[in-house]
Amino acid sequence: MRQWVCWDDGELVSAGEYTRSHVSTLSGMPLHLEKAFLIHLAEIFMQRYESREIKFPLVISDSDEVNRKRTKHFYRRLFCQTEDGMGITQEFITHASESLTWWLEMSHESVLFADGGKPHNSDPAYDTLTILDDGEGNVRLRVVQAKATRANTSQNASEAIAKFADLELGLYDADLSSSLELIQQRGVIPGIDVGELLFDVANRRYRIVIVHGREDNDFHVLGGFANRISGPVERRSAVLVKIDFDLLWSSLGEIIYDKLV
């Protein structure tokens, strides 16, 4: 999956005691100029929005098969009329950033499965649940939040950590249990009792993916991470994705809207 982007293994940030990785394109061009990747992301976006099982490799289907969900009516919450024509809504940006986050999670070799939830997700403390191999034969759960923000990274990161802390304390155990049991029922990882991961709190991992439009890509926004989520550093991580906040989403929107009837 790294034919378009790459990310480092993560540097240790002493303030917050977490690892921080940066995502960049292999070509060095801005992400919105990687047309092949945008087409790939568009199909992931649409398959997730239509609640279809995502298959790899992906291209936008030009099949003659009728897809009754791939319509402007079905997608009406994601697009709006503007003075310049058709525009995208905040709900579009939210679903797009969550789709990008899901793709980044699934692109890691250690990941066994990643569940991106349902459209317009209302889960209180996570957007993606990732089940991974820790390299020592143990199966672990990583709880991931996607934060798409033009520049207000500190507030968004603080909100994510607060939700993680509530989850760590067990305030959302019923929500998390339901999500894990649904994954278990789908039978996507034979031989693994996904539901049992609810109780492995000490080894649970937390990640924030920040898709941002700031000029710099080297900022410290998670100083309180270790205070809210204790334990070894591998429990806490952040991934920074620097984008042109307007052009990426509008370019992706154009591709998707063009495929709707």
Image (cartoon, helix red, strand yellow):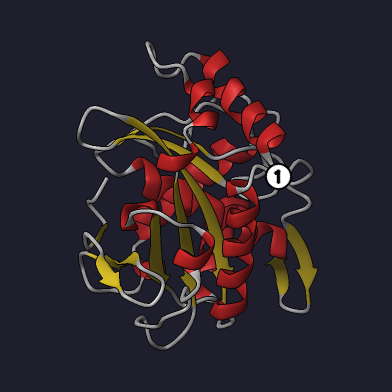
In this orientation, which residue lies closer to the viewer: 174 or 258? Answer: 174
Q: Secondary structure at mark 1?
A: loop
Residue furthest out toward the bottom: 215
What residue is pinned by disc 1?
171
Residue at horizontal 63 percent and vertical 40 percent from the top = 49
Where does residue 87 sit, x and y in percent of width and height? Answer: 70, 67
Q: Which sits in the foreground, 29 or 222? A: 222
Asked whether the viewer can see residue 43, the reply is no
For disc 1, the neighbor class at 10 Å (few under 14, some 14 to 19, many from 20) is some
Q: As displayed, is residue 39 above or below residue 157? A: above
Quadrant where the image shows the C terminus? top right
Q: Nearer the viewer, residue 119 or 217?
A: 217
- In the image, 72: left or right of 154? right
Task: Give x and y (percent) for residue 83.
Answer: 78, 79
Find residue 144 and report its horizontal and vertical position in percent: 50, 50
Q: Residue at x 54, y 31 (%)?
A: 198
In the figure, 237 relative to 172: above or below? below
Tell me the quadrant of the picture where the N terminus can be found.
Answer: top left
